[in-house]
Image: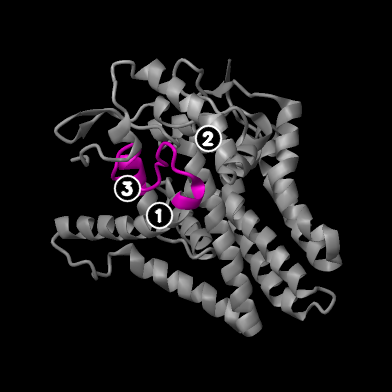
Amino acid sequence: MTQTPTALQSALPFWASFLLLPLAWIGATYGGWTIFLLPLCTWYLFSALDALTGLDLSNADPATPETHLTWYKRLTALWGPAQFLTLFAMIWYVPRADHLATWEAIALMFGTGVLTGTIGINYSHELMHQRNRLERWLGDLLLAMVLYSHFRSEHLLVHHRYVGTPRDPVTARYNENFHRFFPRVLRQSLVSSFKAEAAMLARKGKPWHARANPFWRYWALQALMLALAAAFSGWAGLGLFLLQALTAIWQLELVNYVEHYGLTRKHLGGGRYEHVQPRHSWNAAHRASNWLLINLQRHSDHHYKPDRRFPLLQTYGEDEAPQLPYGYPVMTVAALIPPLWRRVMNPRVRAWRKQFYPEIDDWRPYNKAQTPPPR
């Protein structure tokens, strides 16, 4: 069934993310068990809602004009200012809150990091894919708030181009557990993103340190965020800011781990790989968690058509894309427990291989990312 999103009513469920902001203030005001409301609701409330609301297999008309997407665009545009105010108000308030013990302050900023990672980085991902300069700047500001600005370069110049090949750090390898994936991707993504930008400049006859290198903007914005945190609450504010940033990055990379685990593009010889297809990303049609994540779980279509805005992303059936058994909130928790993850996902990867690539007999080079590097 095809739907055309045209009004606030159809966009409203995606605004559920704004309902999470008051939970940060409830935790900061009352302390105790209320501190855990934010991460628990982000992870488990929407998982429960998934069980109640089921799958959404409908697809919007991809030809829907931009003028019909106003309320969707406002959502991603308004989140940045709302997150900025919440984050820095917390950094100012928490060190001065005598009723909060040290562990409560730490737990509170962990929950804030879950928010800035699950929602903030996700919204920055939507914004960075747009051609509008203002939207791209809003995406940069969201990433600066978690000290992960290079994610924009890595995602646009490396991940989308090389997904499912040895050159993509973010494609999790078969049998690679998250606790090994996380430090590897932190190191390799920073290096690969910088090299990608330097290579672009070199093709234009410019050195890496040219003003056109976006890393200058990344570093300046991140320095500004760190300075604000220190100005608001000194060393305590700086520590709280760093804690939420690390949590946000960890949350992002958990999602990255899930999105492409074990899925590889076929090597055609001579460093050539097949084109990206919906089958190279895990798809999840779970309704409520797609509200929270603005259809990020329709990841198969995002990689197939990266220019599509989130309300127009399509979902696919099992004949075109592999399906996750649960939404990201459940799957990311499973990823933290490697034996459970392998039990759930490895049979699905093997089934995917038999379905789409029955002609490949030896998967060992793909498992170890030892196929030839792409041209």
In the rendered image, residue 16 lying in the magenta stretch gets the answer: no
Q: Nearer the viewer, residue 151 or 216?
A: 151
Q: In the picture provided, is 9 more to the left or to the right than 336? A: right
Spatial CA span between label 1 and label 2 = 19 Å
In the rendered image, residue 175 lying in the magenta stretch gets the answer: yes
State the residue position of label 2: 342
Counting from the top left corner in percent of width and height, residue 123 is at 54, 49
Amino acid at the residue labelled 3: Val
Amino acid at the residue labelled 1: Arg
In the rendering, which numbered label is found on residue 158?
3
Image position of 184 with respect to 72: above or below: below
Are dots 1 and 2 in contact, CB under 8 Å?
no
Spatial CA span between label 1 and label 3 = 15 Å
The magenta region covers 156-180
Which quadrant does the N terminus fall into?
top right
Tell me the crowding category of disc 3: few under 14, some 14 to 19, or many 20 or more residues within 10 angstroms, Cα based: many
Q: Would you identify the image quadrant in which residue 367 lies?
A: top left
User: In terms of sequence position, does the residue under pointer 3 or pointer 2 come before the other?
Assistant: 3
State the residue position of label 1: 184
Tell me the crowding category of disc 1: few under 14, some 14 to 19, or many 20 or more residues within 10 angstroms, Cα based: few
Secondary structure under badge 3? helix
Secondary structure under badge 1? helix
